[in-house]
Amino acid sequence: MANNYEMITARVTAVEQATPLIKRFTLVRQDGQPLPTFTGGSHIIVQMQGADGRRFSNAYSLMSDPADTRAYQIGVRLEEQSKGGSAFMHNQVEVGTELTISTPNNLFAIDPSAGRHVLIAGGIGITPFLAQLYELQAQGAAYELHYAFRAPEHGAFQDELSTGPHAEHVQLYIDSLGRMLDLRQLFSGLAADAHVYVCGPKPLIDAVIATARDLGIDDARVHWEQFAATPASGGAFTVVLAKSGTELRVEEGVTILQAIEKTTTVEVECLCREGVCGTCETRILEGEAEHFDQYLSDDEKASQRTMMLCVSRARGERLVLDL
Ligand code: FES
């Protein structure tokens, strides 16, 4: 697919330690112009280059007010299993650092048909909702935010949530204090026109989807987003690149993209490397994919016409790709 993102040179103007593991970065355009407009739930892709030449690329949700295009803000969690990007942001990026960022794209937009918006965040999953809260408030929409985290020190931005303009719409749940989010109870009182949005760790997303299904809530009313890199788990399989006539083995722990880069000269365009941007989308000629990306819709995934090579894998023993 064509790469629809434009890249912008940005400069970091503020770095704030929000929790022991999360930093908030404020970015402006290097040329002083306003940044592109965006809607709540949008992400940007941040490209980083280390002093040793290593390049990293991660998608981050925009958490600032969409009405303010003077600066963007992103929240970055230092991941234990970092591919390098979050560690770079935490250890190398400071006020004055230049970064290349993409124009925003939104895969997690507010659904305008909903009569009420029920936002559920876990940990760093709070970031897209911060931008959506501004948007929902500006629209005069009915909304509520349920924000769960494991201990008081890990609740990012909880002071501004608890005391700011959204305070009466926000509920905090803190595991270590025994204040747990009860999804079944929350959903049992859900209005028929309410939509649910969830962002955070995979177990929380899975629990929200499963509980909603169990209670008969239509899938179309449940929206989710997760940017954490999908582990390249799952058994080994064979990939055939039809145009170049190459056959290669993709081992457990390796993505198709990595295997292609390591063993062939075939060039695959890729920007985010985490199933978000769509640039590595490739046609499937034979076989079926196990999709792990955020980019394709459920219908597109079911059609098995294309797949994202940076995260998705084979469902069987063999895949033939249009490369
Ligand atoms: S590189 Fe972005 S989806 Fe694969």
Image: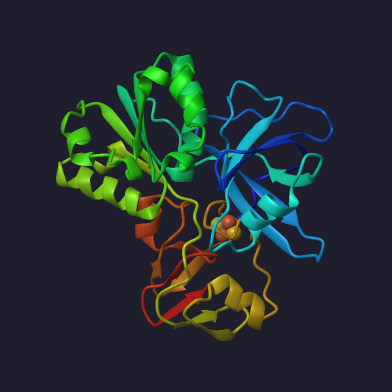
Q: Nearer the viewer, residue 126 or 305?
A: 126
Taking the image in four quarters, ligand 1 sits in the one at: bottom right
Quadrant housing residue 87: bottom right
Q: How many marks?
A: 0
Residue at the image point whose x is 30% and y is 22% from the top: 115
- Considering every residue shown, the one lying at the far front of the view is 177
- Please state the horizontal and vertical placement of residue 15, each as a whole percent of the image: 69, 38
The N terminus sits in image quarter: bottom right
Quadrant housing residue 191: top left
Q: Nearer the viewer, residue 12 or 41?
A: 12
In this rendering, would 205 be left or right of 14? left
In this rendering, would 61 be left or right of 56? left
Residue at the image point whose x is 54% and y is 73% from the top: 256
Residue at the image point whose x is 63% and y is 80% from the top: 244
In this rendering, would 263 be left or right of 115? right
The C terminus sits in image quarter: bottom right
Answer above or below: position of 290 versus 242: above
Answer above or below: position of 2 versus 176: below
- Please state the horizontal and vertical placement of residue 304, each as a whole percent of the image: 39, 63
- Please state the horizontal and vertical placement of residue 99, each as a whole percent of the image: 76, 46
Is residue 114 shown to the viewer in this render?
no
Is residue 102 shown to the viewer in this render?
yes
Residue at the image point whose x is 60% and y is 21% from the top: 67
- Please state the horizontal and vertical placement of residue 263, each as a whole percent of the image: 64, 83
Answer above or below: position of 246 versus 57: below
